[in-house]
Amino acid sequence: MDFRHAKFQQLDGAASYRIYGHELEFERDAAPTGAVARRGWRLVHPCYCVHDSPQNPCRCVSGPFFWLSRGGIIGEGNSGRKDQQGKELQYFDVLVDSKIMVETVRPVSAGVLKSLGEAISDEAVLWAACESDFGGLGVAAKGLIPAEWLRALLGRFPR
């Protein structure tokens, strides 16, 4: 490696963040030409690599998903690293000043949504989804907060 190449690597490293993962096709059989691709977004299931080895592969969890702006990606390719199933990971070098949209999927009990009654709103559903992280059913379903208190509290959110 010559000095020039080493310097470019150093500069790219300072101006970018490397994401490991699997690119997902968002629009079946149309990823390069679909609406999302035309708008410049790519969907990636990220994996977290600390020290990759056959005994310690990169950890890929069920969520969240990253939406990467095509304009923010300055490099990509096969990483030479593997996930828990032995599948090759891709890397995406993303400019540090670009935005990454993080999408999560969270379970919420239908009972919790029903208990919201007329207080249901986007904010109330998001609150219930955040609370569901503490046991999967939300604090109201576990009886920690009486349903009428929950409805009164969430009724204060504007719709």
Image (cartoon, grey):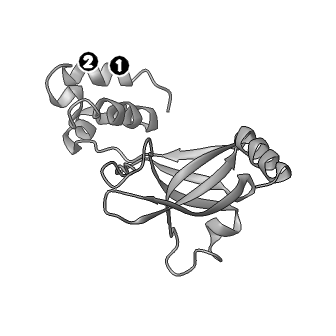
Residue type pointed to by label 1? Leu
Dot 2: what SS? helix
Residue 24's spot in the image, x, y percent?
49, 65
The structure residue drawn at horizontal position 70% and vertical position 63%, both measured from the top left corner, is: 39
Near-viewer residue (113 or 82) = 82
Residue 35's spot in the image, x, y percent?
64, 70
Q: Which residue is mark 2?
A: 149
Kindly report the distance in space between the C-alpha atoms of the residues bearing marks 2 and 1.
6 Å
Q: Quadrant of the N terminus?
A: bottom right
Q: Residue furthest bottom?
A: 29
Disc 2 + disc 1, Cβ < 8 Å: yes
Q: Residue furthest left?
A: 143
Q: Which residue is mark 1?
A: 153
Residue type pointed to by label 2? Trp
Q: Is residue 50 left or right of residue 118?
A: right
The structure residue drawn at horizontal position 24% and vertical position 39%, both measured from the top left corner, is: 114
The structure residue drawn at horizontal position 81% and vertical position 49%, both measured from the top left corner, is: 8
